[in-house]
């Protein structure tokens, strides 16, 4: 789909008011997006698993008004701290969804996962809001379901890059890759040719540190622009994406683990070698990784980890090993979790 087709074109009358509610999950990148150009264009393609148990539900209540305005609430409580990011989002999407500027919009969101848990809610949050906005466009113009999701992914990207991938599952790819048909830097696409083992693959998130990050992802992305290893990193991610597609199809768990753990550690290596350098992992992150490696060696259970831009650890494993992994978490890893919390 070309960008031209995503432009809003309608002379139809707008509804006076209404309420739309949409849900969207979070996602975890296996090949990481780390580095971007203006506006929200990734410097390498990324591939994610969709986390269907961690989602945001967002409703937009819209009433026609002379001037555009919006309110933002989480669980019905005003959250002014999110207004600047939403202001940026609305200014970026205005040429693509101009109809919303005829309304006062009350945005109300709820997450199934705990707020302030150190889990990025921006992916599920922006994708749920974007889906609600493109659903309103569908109501006005009658765009197809496919167009609705593409548009939602496109405008989600303008809110938060990783959000563009949340609209699709079990996996999504965002960013142009010559081997991926229809791939785009402007929106994500579904990636569903995966071996059955990955359809039910588990992700348990160990909440090592629930605090707010000292360095935002936006700053981290920007630091890639003058990074001494950025070129090599972008090439590596491009290569990894192609390799991971093959692995996801074959179900080769050994290669899956090698690739995804390398991606996680490279992401953090980029942070540790940027200028200024920084570390988001905590002692508990490293202790967990060491324990996971020992457990895998001793039991031959294909348990692996990946990391987001933070201290929390995502444990990845086939569903058949769920009981053994839960026993291991409760006996060996729970001590590294803040308030002994983890999310399945
Ligand atoms: C990812 N992350 O692929 C990477 C890996 C975190 C680590 O994208 O600036 O909130 O809003 O586009 O999407 C987190 O950054 O950044 C992220 P913006 P975003 O998921």
Image: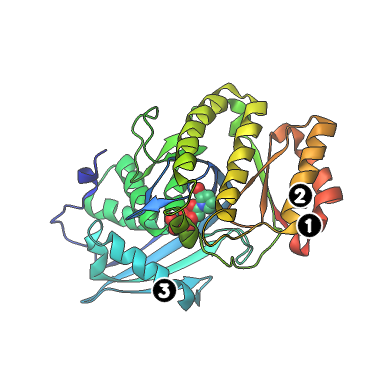
The answer to which image quadrant residue 103 occupies is bottom left
The residue drawn where x is 70% and y is 58% is 207
Q: CA distance from mark 2 to mark 3?
A: 36 Å
Q: What SS does tag 2 mark?
A: helix
Task: From the image, state whether disc 1 or disc 3 is nearer to you.
Answer: 1
Q: What SS does tag 3 mark?
A: helix
Q: Quadrant of the N terminus?
A: top left
Q: Residue furthest top?
A: 250
342 on left or right of 20 = right
User: Which circle's residue, 2 or 3, is located before the other in the chain?
Assistant: 3
**Label 3 crowd (10 A; few <14 / some 14-19 / many >=20):** some
Above or below 126: residue 288: above
Q: Which mark is residue 83?
A: 3
Residue 294 location in percent, x, y?
82, 39
**Label 1 crowd (10 A; few <14 / some 14-19 / many >=20):** many
Using the image as rendered, state which of residue 205 and residue 114 is in the foreground: 205
Q: Which mark is residue 288?
A: 2
Give the labeled residue for mark 1: 336
Residue 283 location in percent, x, y?
75, 58
Using the image as rendered, state which of residue 341 and residue 247 is in the foreground: 247
Q: What SS does tag 1 mark?
A: helix
Task: Tell me if label 2 and label 1 are in contact, CB under 8 Å.
Answer: yes
Residue 280 location in percent, x, y?
63, 59
Q: CA distance from mark 2 to mark 1?
A: 7 Å
User: Which circle's residue, 1 or 3, is located before the other in the chain?
Assistant: 3
The residue drawn where x is 24% and y is 47% is 6
User: Which circle's residue, 2 or 1, is located before the other in the chain?
Assistant: 2
Task: From the image, state whether disc 2 or disc 3 is nearer to you.
Answer: 2
């Amino acid at each position: 789909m070309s960008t031209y087709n995503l432009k809003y074109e309608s002379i139809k009358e707008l509804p006076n008011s209404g309420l739309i509610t949409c849900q969207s999950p979070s996602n975890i990148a296996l090949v990481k997006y780390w580095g971007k150009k203006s506006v929200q264009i990734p410097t390498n393609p990324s591939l994610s698993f969709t986390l269907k148990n961690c989602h945001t539900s967002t409703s937009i209540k819209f009433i026609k008004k002379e001037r555009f305005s919006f309110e933002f609430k989480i669980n019905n409580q005003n959250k002014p701290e999110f207004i600047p990011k939403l202001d940026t989002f609305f200014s970026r999407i205005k040429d693509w969804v101009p109809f919303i500027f005829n309304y006062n919009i009350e945005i109300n969101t709820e997450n199934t996962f705990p707020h302030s848990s150190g889990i990025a809610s921006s992916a599920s949050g922006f994708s749920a809001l974007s889906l609600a906005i493109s659903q309103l466009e569908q109501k006005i113009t009658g765009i197809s379901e496919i167009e609705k999701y593409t548009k939602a992914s496109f405008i989600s990207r303008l809110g938060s890059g990783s959000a563009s991938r949340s609209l699709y599952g079990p996996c999504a790819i965002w960013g142009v890759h010559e081997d991926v048909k229809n791939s785009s830097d402007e929106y994500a696409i579904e990636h569903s040719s995966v071996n059955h083992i990955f359809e039910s693959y588990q992700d348990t998130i160990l909440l090592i540190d629930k605090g707010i990050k000292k360095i935002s992802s936006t700053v981290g992305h920007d630091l890639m622009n003058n990074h001494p290893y950025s070129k090599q990193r972008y090439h590596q991610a491009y290569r990894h994406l192609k390799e991971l597609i093959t692995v996801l199809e074959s179900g080769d768990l050994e290669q899956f683990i090698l690739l995804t753990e390398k991606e996680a550690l490279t992401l953090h290596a980029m942070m540790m070698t940027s200028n200024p350098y920084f570390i988001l992992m905590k002692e508990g992150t490293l202790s967990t990784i060491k324990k996971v490696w020992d457990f895998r060696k001793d039991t031959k259970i294909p348990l692996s980890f990946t990391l987001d831009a933070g201290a929390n650890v995502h444990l990845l494993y086939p569903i058949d090993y769920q009981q053994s992994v839960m026993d291991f978490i409760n006996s060996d890893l729970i001590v590294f979790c803040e308030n002994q919390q983890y999310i399945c």
